[in-house]
């Protein structure tokens, strides 16, 4: 991870013999940032080939004593290119350092208590800096900010609602029934990224909780608090996390304090939210109205045209709001050699493109690092978040009259659905729901209060020239209190004669805490040529949840409380999980030429069939830096590294899969219990992934150009599936280990300093990645995956040996046929950062997704309702003439999208000094956009879609989603 390194001036310089002091001469100077001329604090200045060194002070000044001339001074700082300058005598030497485009000095976490420079890394670990994450445009959520920035990561938006809803897949699908979202670690704390259903389905008729358009709770973390993200995409890198690392691991480090005077930063973003791709309405004529419906409908059409000259554009009426976005941030950072602090607060308020929708988040953060003594130091990270969202009603339903897209599919634009002068809303004559009534009166809201606390204590037990032993004790708490509220008035069209009004209130609490103790031993052998780092430790994780959903129907007139209803139902789900593990890892480094790692982790979990059985997860890696060998003489090739790695991770069974449950029954007015139909399997094993990874890294022209290539093959064994049981068994189904899966893929990355001139700097990057999956073993007949489609008639995910896990299958002419595959053929991303005259920044990110298909069932509904915009064309009429099967609704989902773009201007230092004196250090302002344009053949709002949220096999199936939006911002940043 990137962090500023501060080293003490070696004590022997001050304690040396007097006659040695007489032979020394001093070199001093000033170190500044080449880009903007600001002083650089904490730059390491070392005499090459010796251990003699110092660091630059608060003002960028340094001073070092040199015994013998000539000598070479090495200037290095994380995030900047290292410079070596030869000196022949005592002099004043001022130095400028340029930001590093390659990041070879970047520090990457390779164990739970150790790290390594990227130059020596043996895995394809991707990193995203704060600048890459939020430096171009404003970001609402962390996962939404990662688009196009990490090779091997497929991101799908499950909702365009403010506050997001995203599915992240690292190197493909890792489980069919289990978790596919990566493990999130924030400052050492296991971060809960749960999707919480609200009970909306009990009013809308949706099939499952994952169809309720919920957000995942990574939305509670402010992206602007993040300093660095490391993505462990595969088992070879994530093996140290054992049975929680099967879907990959995302390690987030938030901002820290820096030594120096206290600096205050203020930022204000103001923006707008508009629908990105409106579809428009069918260009009706009187003749087409009569042909599609009847003469009576044509008369209504003619009357509306005569009365107001146009039809009602209900798509624009519902989705056409211009949402206002504001985000205000204030933080302070500073410290001295003993204590460093970062304190910040932010408030974001984002209105949606549907009236009465929005998302707001209030966040406070305090990060403190304190050196108690030369032996002890500790770090504390504290984050409180309060977030609220109103997501309204979209997605799948069954005659609930709530989902806008579903309702609009059957709403004819010549019918007036606006309220009259008395506030009475007319019924929709063609579907049991008036979308304007729902927008104005129904509610689907949630609020969250969250505290995340991390603590770590480092104890330096032994420090000698060759041995360094430390003990790291750390722990974390993540407490989330979530409340949901769904309200549908009794006067809603579908509620009249039905439920008679609906209210659902959720009170959901999640508590998880983790602790770990790690011993780390660093040993320098053979005169410092060989370094050995050994770590051993243990970890503990406890997760508890208590979800209570209270629902009422047949409401008293005008009431919104559950207790004011006739029919009341309470559901409660409680879970408790415990994981415990041991781990050990040894890393060896010989002259930065050979770097090898061996590790092993053993875990047990209460979710496994035998909660006391330990499962082992090994890892091994080797990197060979040929460019660091003495024989290397190719000056233009500054890095040539080959690497190979293998690792295993796991994924326990879902909570409750190991036992057979009892359900409550009412027997003659008395409480009773009976065995449920799902049979538990006490012998179920965790799913286990073993990944082999091989690659190489190249650097040219002092690493101004860098290239990375990685091939991986990940075998997932013992997938946990649910199979049907014969009725004679007394059960209907059982969950157990039944299948294997393989993912293999290729990841390429090219980065370059195209121009490096005092007045023009241009950095550019290209990412390319692809993944292929296959079911390699299936112990049951091929089957449509429950909850991942709408049957073989309209299309569904279909689990079949020898086929991709992401295939879409439908019945075509009586035969089960693969009609598509949601996995892209490949994805690419193009980034460019241009700095002109040290004051103007131009940045953009272009993303290309090639191939992959979606099942567009929104078109199925609008075809049924006769309102699809293209039905006046020959193509649309030809589609109507084909059978309503999966083949008819499969569409290409590739696209090219300008994901982010911005232009910024920094006021010159001279102007700042003239206007503000020494009060203001920097002012930057500019404009940016997000989702600026998309080129695609997909016919609906966005080819990134998922009706099933972020869990399981979720992407690629569309049913009337919340449309995606386009955002534009004005930014102002002031540093004091």
Image (tube, helix red, strand yellow):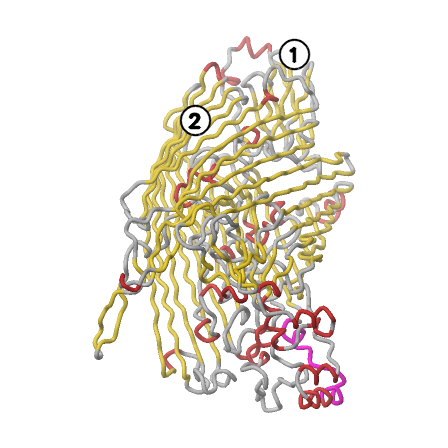
Q: Can residue 59 be seen from the camera position used here?
A: no
Q: Secondary structure at mark 1?
A: loop
Mark 1 vs 2: CB contact within 8 A: no
Please give the label number shown on residue 533. Answer: 2
Q: Quadrant of residue 23?
A: top right
Examine the rendered structure and indicate whether residue 597 appears above or below residue 769: above
N-term-proximal mark, 1 vs 2: 1
Which residue is at 71% across, 43% downward? 833
Which SS does the magenta portion mostly show?
Answer: helix
Span colored in magenta = 304-319
On the image, the x and y values in percent for residue 96 come to: 69, 30
Whole-angstrom CA distance, mark 1 to mark 2, is 35 Å
Query: Residue at label 1?
Result: 69
On the image, the x and y values in percent for residue 412 come to: 65, 81
Q: Is residue 246 left or right of residue 282?
A: left
Please give the label number shown on residue 595. Answer: none
On the image, the x and y values in percent for residue 234 come to: 49, 41
Q: Is residue 829 left or right of residue 508?
A: right
Which residue is at 65% across, 54% downward? 894
Q: Quadrant of residue 456?
A: top left
Q: Residue furthest top?
A: 19
Q: Residue furthest front?
A: 814
Residue 305 in magenta? yes
Which residue is at 57% across, 86% downward? 427
Local packing at callout 1 (Cα closer than 10 Å; few below 14, some 14-19, many 20+) is few
Which residue is at 54% across, 56% downward? 166
Q: Can residue 602 be seen from the camera position used here?
A: yes
Residue 335 in magenta? no
């Amino acid at each position: 991870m990137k962090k500023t390194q501060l080293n003490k001036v070696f004590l022997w310089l001050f304690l040396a013999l007097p006659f040695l002091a007489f032979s020394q001469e001093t070199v001093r100077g000033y170190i500044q940032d080449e880009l903007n001329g600001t002083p650089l604090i904490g730059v390491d200045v070392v005499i090459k080939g010796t251990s003699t060194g110092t660091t630059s002070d608060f003002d960028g000044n340094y001073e070092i004593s040199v015994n013998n001339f000539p000598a070479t001074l090495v200037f290095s700082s994380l995030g900047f290119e290292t410079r070596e300058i030869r000196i022949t005598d005592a002099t004043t030497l001022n130095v400028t350092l340029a930001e590093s485009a390659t990041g070879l000095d970047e520090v990457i976490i390779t164990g739970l208590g150790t790290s390594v420079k990227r130059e020596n890394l043996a895995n394809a670990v991707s990193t995203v800096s704060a600048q890459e994450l939020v430096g171009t445009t404003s970001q609402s959520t962390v996962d939404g900010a990662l688009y196009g920035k990490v090779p091997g990561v497929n991101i799908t938006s499950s909702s365009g609602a403010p506050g997001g809803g995203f599915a992240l897949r690292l190197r493909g699908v890792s489980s069919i029934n289990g978790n596919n979202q990566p493990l999130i670690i924030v400052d050492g704390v296991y971060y809960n990224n749960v999707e919480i259903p609200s009970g909306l389905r009990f009013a809308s008729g949706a099939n499952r909780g994952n169809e309720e358009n919920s957000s995942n709770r990574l939305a509670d973390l402010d992206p602007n608090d993040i300093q660095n993200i490391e993505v462990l995409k595969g088992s070879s890198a994530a093996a140290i996390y054992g049975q929680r690392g099967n879907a990959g691991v995302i390690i987030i480090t938030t901002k820290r304090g820096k030594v120096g005077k206290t600096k205050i930063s203020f930022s204000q973003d103001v923006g707008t939210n508009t629908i990105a791709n409106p579809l428009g309405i069918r260009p009706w004529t009187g003749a087409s109205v009569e042909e599609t419906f009847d003469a009576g409908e044509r008369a209504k059409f003619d009357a509306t045209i005569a009365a107001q000259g146009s039809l009602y554009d209900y798509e624009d009426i519902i989705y056409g709001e211009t949402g206002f976005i504001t985000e205000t941030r204030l933080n302070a950072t500073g410290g001295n050699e003993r204590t460093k602090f970062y304190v910040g607060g932010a408030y974001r308020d984002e209105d949606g493109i549907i009236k009465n929708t929005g998302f707001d988040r209030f966040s406070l953060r305090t990060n403190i690092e304190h050196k108690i003594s030369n032996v002890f130091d500790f770090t504390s990270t504290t984050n409180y978040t309060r977030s609220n969202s109103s997501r309204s009603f979209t997605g799948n339903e069954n005659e609930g009259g709530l989902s806008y897209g579903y309702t609009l599919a059957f709403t004819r634009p010549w019918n007036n659905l606006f309220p009259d002068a008395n506030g009475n809303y007319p019924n929709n004559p063609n579907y049991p729901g008036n979308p304007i009534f729902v927008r104005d009166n129904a509610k689907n809201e949630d609020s969250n209060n969250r505290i995340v606390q991390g603590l770590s204590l480092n104890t330096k037990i032994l420090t000698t020239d060759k041995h360094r032993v430390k003990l790291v004790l750390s722990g974390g708490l993540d407490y989330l209190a979530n409340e949901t509220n769904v309200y549908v008035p009794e006067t809603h069209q579908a509620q009249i004669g039905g439920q008679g009004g609906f209210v659902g209130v959720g009170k959901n609490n999640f508590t998880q805490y983790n602790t770990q103790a790690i011993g780390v031993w660093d040993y320098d052998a053979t005169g410092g040529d060989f370094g050995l780092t050994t770590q051993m430790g243990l970890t503990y994780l406890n997760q508890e949840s208590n979800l209570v959903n209270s629902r009422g129907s047949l409401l008293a007139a005008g009431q919104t409380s559950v207790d004011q209803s006739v029919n009341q139902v309470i559901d409660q789900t409680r879970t408790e999980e415990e994981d415990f593990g041991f781990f050990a890892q040894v890393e060896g480094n010989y002259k930065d030429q050979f770097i090898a790692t061996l590790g092993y982790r053993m875990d047990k979990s209460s979710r496994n069939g035998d909660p006391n059985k330990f499962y082992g997860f090994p890892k091994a890696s080797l990197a060979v830096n040929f460019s660091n060998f003495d024989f290397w003489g190719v000056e233009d090739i500054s890095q040539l590294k080959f690497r190979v790695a293998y690792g295993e991770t796991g994924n326990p069974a879902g909570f409750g899969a190991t036992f057979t449950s009892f359900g409550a029954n009412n027997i003659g007015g008395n409480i009773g219990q009976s065995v449920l139909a799902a049979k538990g399997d006490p012998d179920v094993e965790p799913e286990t992934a073993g990944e082999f990874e091989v690659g190489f890294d190249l650097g040219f022209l002092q690493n101004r150009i860098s290239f990375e290539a990685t091939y991986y093959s990940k075998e997932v064994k013992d997938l946990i599936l649910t199979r049907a049981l014969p009725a004679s068994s007394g059960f209907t189904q059982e969950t157990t280990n039944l299948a294997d899966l393989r993912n293999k893929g290729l990841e390429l990355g090219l980065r370059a300093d195209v121009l490096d001139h005092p007045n023009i700097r241009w950095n550019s990057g290209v990412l390319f990645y692809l993944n292929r999956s296959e079911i390699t073993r299936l112990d049951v007949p091929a089957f449509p995956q429950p909850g991942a489609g709408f049957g073989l008639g309209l299309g569904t995910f279909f689990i079949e040996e020898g086929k991709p896990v992401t295939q879409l299958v439908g019945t075509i002419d009586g035969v089960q046929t693969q009609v598509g595959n949601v996995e892209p053929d490949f994805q690419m991303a193009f980034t460019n950062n241009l700095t002109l005259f040290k004051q103007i920044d131009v940045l953009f990110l272009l993303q290309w997704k090639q191939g992959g298909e979606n099942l567009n069932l929104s078109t199925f509904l609008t075809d049924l309702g006769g309102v699809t915009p293209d039905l006046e064309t020959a193509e649309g009429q030809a589609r109507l003439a084909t059978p309503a099967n999966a083949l008819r609704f499969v569409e290409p989902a590739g696209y090219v999208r300008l994901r982010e773009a911005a232009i910024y201007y920094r006021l010159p230092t001279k102007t700042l000094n003239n206007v503000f004196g020494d009060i203001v250090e920097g002012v930057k302002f500019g404009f940016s956009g997000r989702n600026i344009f998309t080129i695609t053949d997909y016919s609906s709002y966005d080819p990134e879609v998922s009706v099933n949220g972020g869990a399981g096999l979720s992407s690629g199936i569309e049913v009337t989603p919340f449309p995606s939006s386009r955002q534009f911002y004005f930014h102002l940043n002031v540093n004091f």
